Structure formats: C-alpha cells, structure tokens
Image (cartoon, rainbow, N blue to C red):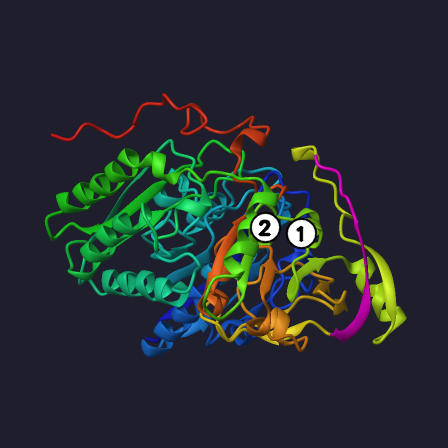
Amino acid sequence: MTQRFVVAVMRHETNTFSPVPTPVVDFGRIGPTDGPAFGDEALRVYRDTNNPVAAYIDLAEAEGAEIVFPVAANAHPSAPAPDAIIDLCVERISEAVTAGCDALFLDLHGAMVTQGYDDGEGLLLRRIREISPELPIALALDFHTNLTSEIVDNATIIAGYRTYPHIDMYETGDRAGRTLLRAMKGEISPFMVWHSLPVLTHMNRHAPSMEPMKSMMAKAIAAESDGRVLNASIFGCFPLADIPHVGLSAIVVGDKRNDPDQAERLLYDILGEGWDRREEFIYPVEPVETSITDAKSLAESEGDGPIILADHGENTGSGGSQDVMAVLQEVMRQGLTNVVAGPFCDPTSVQTMVDAGVGTTITLLLGGKTDTPSMDLKGEPLEVTGTIRRITDGAFTVTGPMFTGVKMNIGRCAVLDTGDIEIVVSEGRYEPFDTGCFTHAGIDPTRKSFVLIKSRQHFRAGFEPMSKGIVLVSGPGCCSSDYSLFPWKNLRRPVYPLDPDVESNLPTQS
C-alpha cells in the first residue's frame, strides 16, 4: 500500500517588542500580504527551493509516497501573531492527518509567539498529538529556536539549522526526514535529550561560523557525521522575546540500540562549553557615529569591493520596521559618497514617487512613519531631495545561497538618487540576504563604495563575498543588542548577562 506523508510549513520569528503587526494575511507564500498557501499551490511555491519542506518533498517522492501539503504559512519576523493562525494550521493539518497519514513532516521556526500563547509551535504540536498520539513526526527548526518541553515531548525527531545565515535549510529537512524514515523502517530506535541554559545570547555573537559557537557546533556535526548519535542540534535562541523559555539550548537524538548514554554525554559537553564561554556571547555596542567613522577609514584601505554597513538595531529579519533613518542620517552627515542604501519600507513615499514619475526631482520626508512604544522611540522622518531614477514591481528570484530559488516580492520599489546616495524605498519589508533587492532595480552593489542595509547576519549570504569590509552598526530600534533598553517582564530570571551572578542549571556529571 502506498504511504501517505503530510508536509506543512508554519514559520514566524516573533519579536515581542516589535511595532509591526502580524495579521494572518501576512503569512504569505510570495508577497508580504497574500496569505497562506494550500495544497497544490503550496507544493508549487516550495518545491525545488532551499527550504526544509523542499527536502521533505524530495524524500517522499523517493519513497514513492503520496504527498499531502495542507498549508504553508510563513510571515516575516514581527510582533506576536493572532491565535487564529495556529487555529488555521491545526485545522488544515489535522484534516490531512485524520484522512490517513503514515508520517508528518513539519517545517517550523521554533520562536513563534501569538497574542495568547508564548509557544506557538508547542501548541500546534500538542493539538496534533491529541488527535494522533502515535504519529511519527519530524521537525526542522530554525537556529533561533527557543526550545520547550512541549515541542520536544510532541515530536519524534528534531533537527535544527547549523548555519547563520541559514544556507542549510534544505539540508536540515533532509537530516530530520531521513532519520524519521529510518525509524519508521525499524532500522533505529530514536529518543531525544535536551537542555536549555539561562543565557540570553547576542545574535551578533552566536553564528556557527564564528567563535564561541563554532567549536560547539563542530562537536555536534562530528558526532552526527560519525554515527555516535542520529542528530545533534544547537539553538542560539531568539533573544528578542519577552517569554519564560528563551535561552541557549541543544537537543540530541540518540539510538537506544547504540550506547544511549552517548547522547546525554554529548549534550552536556556542548552546553558545558557554552556555559563556560558565556561571556563571549556578549556583543559590545558602540555609538553610530563611531561606526560610520570607522567605515570611512576602512574604505580608504587597499582592496576592491564595497564596505557593508549593516544596521542591526532595526534588523528587518528580527522584527524591525525598516523605517528608522538614524544611520542613513549619520551617513549623510559624515559625507559618505557612492552609497546605495535600503530598502527602506515606506509605502507612502513609494506612492509619492510613483505619482511624480521617473526623472522628477523631489523632496521627501522619508521613513520615520512607525513609532516603537516598547523602546520609547518616536518615528523621525528624514528629509531627502533627489531624482527618481527607477520604479519597479519589487519582484525578483533569489540567486544567492539563502532561500535559493524563492520568488520574492517586496512590493513596488522606487530609487531616489541624491547624487551621493541611491536610496531604494519599498512598500514591503525585506531583510537584504540577497542582492536582488538592488539588482532588480538596476543597481550593481559591487560598484558602490558603501552598501547600507538593515540586517544582522543574513546579509553575509549575499553580500559578504563581494565586500572589502563589514561594519556592524548599532542603530536604534527594537532589535538592539543593548538588552538593558528592553522592558523585560516575562523573561526567565535570573538570566545571563542581565543577571551576571546567575548559576549554571547544568546537572552535575558523575
């Protein structure tokens, strides 16, 4: 009898301090407001892309299984989502599972908060388990997962991304899916052990390509590669969420048939190193003007390519509104030239430029349309004058290593040329992990002296290879690395570094 596999996507990284709302319609398949995809449409959108669910599709087809894709819901990072998105996903997935299902393969985020629940993924899984207690379930989770017992207790297999920028998303789905298939065939007898440390990491310090995470991740990769364990994943956490279960964590999938104690030893070896090196997870914040001055000096050094100015304080990919103008204002004040900047999200300014038309010289009050009450920040528009060079539909296909093959649509875009700076303004939000946000508008970032973008780490996927240097700029916003600025109320306490004297919660190893 042909097996029937259900695959589904529900992803949202929730910044509880973000001023950007997250209606159900924002869980779009291509554009920012076209809503979830269902059935054949979901299959069409995600097939042959660098996403975990694309690996699930390939694995199912290789097994000769029937594929059912009830829902794909994916929203840009922003404020807590309505509970209705959980209800919708549970309803669609439950219908598919109840109709007959041999296994469920889920592509989730791991840091989803809704208006009524602080663990969206845990709620989804628990409700599915209520209708199918024995169903084999594989999860692929984002590196920024805030792991919980409800997620772990209601899954069979869990694997997480090993990269940041996330260029191994397909590989993660493949790792999780293959392990579940082996378990279903009786080749292995999997179990999971996990732990979460009271450490609030800084995202500029936990990329697996850099220390201190690099050596920790290397241990996980080595143990999985040589077969000591089935899967091993580390989660740097998503720290911009005021919820109780934020923290640096890890999970290991072991095989009861192969020295099961190995899984626990690996888990605590990895997290023990994380605890011992917790000071290295702290990112020092410097004034914006200092960073821009450093960038000017770096531009005078030998070498080809632009200097990348990464404004991470309002990183779109962590919930920023993408319209805080403070860093661009400082770039202008210090007289940087041959700059491309953006995209800045300002639908009103885009409409004004569309109405004016290409070739028109215009003065705009750009950005600053969004207040951020949680950070006590008022929107401050920046007056800019320039010539409208191009107007586009904002559509492009990702060619870089992150989300390769995905069709993006960031809404209509307009390019304003001030003489020294080409400013890209968009109707939708987009973290620039791929150069298409500029090249689709006729701008070659490799020919610029400076590229100003709102990103923290994902920009490295598309922009680092072309750059002469990178300067991380701590602009103001709801993605700040200065954790003292946040009005924490529900966060687990004590937690490092807010509480420097917090003690380890690791068990004593004999």
For the point 19% across and 27% down, which residue is it?
508
Return the x and y of residue 60 as percentages of the image width and height.
Answer: 37, 73
| Type of amino acid under label 2 | Ile
Q: Are marks 2 and 1 in contact (CB under 8 Å)?
A: yes
Q: Residue at x 60, y 58 (%)?
A: 453
As displayed, is residue 200 above or below residue 215?
Answer: above
Element under disc 2: helix
Mark 2 and mark 1: Cα distance apart in space: 8 Å
Q: Position of residue 382 (x, y in %)?
A: 78, 50
- The residue wearing badge 1 is 334
Type of amino acid at the residue the image marks with label 1? Gln
The prevailing secondary structure element of the residues shown in magenta is strand
Task: Give residue 127's position: percent from left, percent from top.
Answer: 48, 46
Quadrant location of residue 64? bottom left
Is residue 161 magenta-colored?
no
Q: Is residue 469 visible?
A: yes
Looking at the rendering, in which quadrant would you find the N terminus? bottom left
